[in-house]
Amino acid sequence: MHKWTIIISFLLVLLFTAMFAYTHSGGLDENGGHTNHATGEYHYHSQGDEDIPAVSDAPPETIPPAIPFPVKDFTEYTAYKVIRIVDGDTVRIDIDGTETSVRLIGVDTPETVHPNKPEEKYGKEASIFIHNLLKGESVYLDTDPQNTTDIFGRKLAYLYRAPDGLFVN
């Protein structure tokens, strides 16, 4: 029985130490303070380890607000109808009456229709995702003038959904 008392006591001390270490953990930042994870309070410590409240509840240096991404001007662009989604990184678009295969620049999703490879994990999910973004939509194309097609003859482009300018890639 004595053995179990020691083990349980040790585990309780370990548990309480871990809880305190999490809620009041971390080193001091460049201003000599830190945040208590349990309360969210930002504070400083004196020499005797007693809490000295901060002037405000926020850390001294706050993150500036996000600057919105500039909206692209599409007045000079032509909107092309999406005919079908091939997979998560390739779509077929009607460009001047010709069905054209377009590969999204910078996007590489797991294969679902590769002639020499089996369907890869999460490939269907990637296809469904792009399908939900572009089904029945038109898109604007932005191409790289130095690299217009890939080795399979697909047009390489950045796509923007025509109704709202959403950057698809």
Image: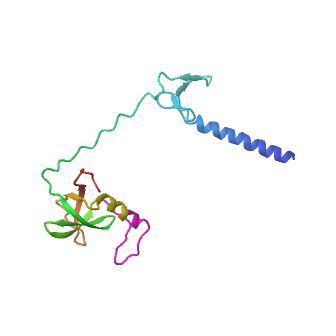
Q: Determine the image quadrant of residue 162.
A: bottom left
160 displayed left or right of 123: left
Q: Is residue 125 magenta?
A: yes
The colour mode here is rainbow
Q: Determine the image quadrant of residue 48.
A: top right
Q: Number of numbered discs present?
A: 0
Residue drawn at (67%, 38%) of the image: 17
Front residue of 124/13: it is: 124
Tell me where residue 25 appears, x and y as whole percent.
58, 36
Residue sticking out furthest to the right: 1
8 displayed left or right of 44: right
Q: Is residue 99 magenta?
A: no
Is 92 rendered above or below residue 52? below
Is 61 rendered above or below residue 99? above
93 displayed left or right of 59: left
Residue drawn at (53%, 26%) of the image: 43
Q: Say which quadrant the C terminus sits in.
A: bottom left
Tell me where residue 2 appears, x and y as whole percent.
86, 45
Tell me where residue 52 appears, x and y as whole percent.
55, 22
Is 37 rendered above or below residue 96? above
Residue sticking out furthest to the front: 136
Type of secondary structure dominating the magenta stretch: loop
Q: Which residues are magenta?
A: 106-126
Residue drawn at (46%, 28%) of the image: 58
Q: Determine the image quadrant of residue 47.
A: top right
Tell me where residue 46 appears, x and y as whole percent.
58, 22
Is 9 rendered above or below residue 123? above
